[in-house]
Amino acid sequence: MTGPGADEDVAAWARGLGLDGLVDIHVHFLPERVLAKVWAYFDGAEQHYGMPWPVHYRLPEAERLAALRAVGVRTFAPLVYPHKPGMAEWLNGWAREFAAREPDAVPTATFFPEPEAARYVEDALRAGVRCVKVHVQVGAFDPRDDRLDAVWGMLADAGVPAVVHCGHGPLRGEHTGLDVFARVLERHPGLVTVLAHAGMPEYDAALRLVQRFPRVYLDTTMVGVPFTESFMPLPGDWPARLAGIADRVVLGTDFPNIPYDYATQLRAIAEWAEADDRLGEPFLRAVLHDTPAKLLDV
Ligand SMILES: [Zn+2]
């Protein structure tokens, strides 16, 4: 069960678990000029985060796609997100074109609190979007904004998962915090929600939301890897805490914008599986494939 040592070992390791590939619900592909800005931000990580953040897969798009396929990812959700109004609909159009040309990418969408949001999210759902990304910290908006109420309702009705970055990690925002997002869930308890980064650093609060709302999931993005453990460590009994909710955890990685390789994330997940007898290989198959495949309907 011990995880893969390097990216070259991942595909064989996954096959050894009986998987035909991995399903990653949290990766990022963006229009080139937007991605250049994201990378420039990580270049200034010492200033923003107080530590360096060297993007491991800083490659042209074709090579990034090849790297993802080489580790045996068979389906992924390329997530886009806006940092200002007037941007989401354009990103949604780009994401739709991207998914049309890359068959292993599911179509995704995003939104921002603005008058057109309900209209373009409805368009996206009608066009067959499988996953939506919401970034409360980068967008700097309140997820309880009135203009989003209809949007959350539509997503809940459609059963389309929303990957929501609403935790305080790695950076706190004006409207981050799982207590804030809990208010959205109270109003829309049927919303299929994937708490990005397992709610980092409020892992306990994230687990409570999973217990409380049957359609809330956690993604593994950057969780438990040595980089994150150095500043937002998991509770010591994390594997035991997962035992009761093993079917509510999905693979996410933040590829390509991570300061380590893909195998490192998988080793962290494999360590949890190994640490508790109730997890083991069935947990790995659920996290790495079955549960994200169910959410994305692939
Ligand atoms: Zn992300």
Image (cartoon, rainbow, N blue to C red):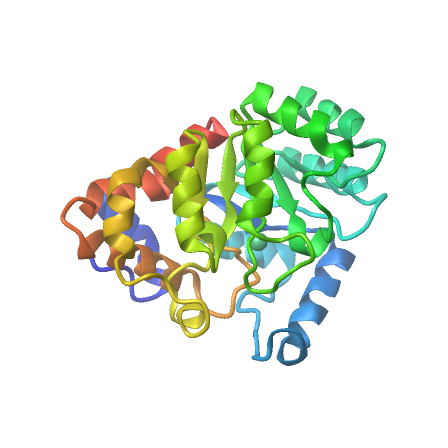
- Answer yes or no: is residue 163 visible: no
Q: Residue 216 in the image: x percent, y percent?
A: 45, 35
Q: Is residue 108 above or below residue 60?
A: above
Residue that appears at 65% across and 22% down: 154
Q: Nearer the viewer, residue 122 or 31?
A: 122
Q: Residue 278 in the image: x percent, y percent?
A: 16, 44
* Image side of residue 148 versus residue 19, left or right: right
Q: Residue 207 in the image: x percent, y percent?
A: 39, 45
Q: Nearer the viewer, residue 211 or 286?
A: 211
Q: Nearer the viewer, residue 140 or 24?
A: 140
* Label total for image: 0
Q: Is residue 130 above or below residue 238?
A: above
Q: Nearer the viewer, residue 233 or 277?
A: 233
Q: Residue 156 in the image: x percent, y percent?
A: 58, 24
Q: Quadrant of residue 6?
A: bottom left
Residue that appears at 39% across and 60% down: 265
Which part of the image, by quadrant, shows the N terminus?
Answer: bottom left
Residue that appears at 63% across and 56% down: 61
- Answer yes or no: is residue 242 visible: yes
* Image side of residue 293 versus residue 128, left or right: left
Residue at the left extreme, as displayed: 277
Residue that appears at 84% across and 31% down: 116
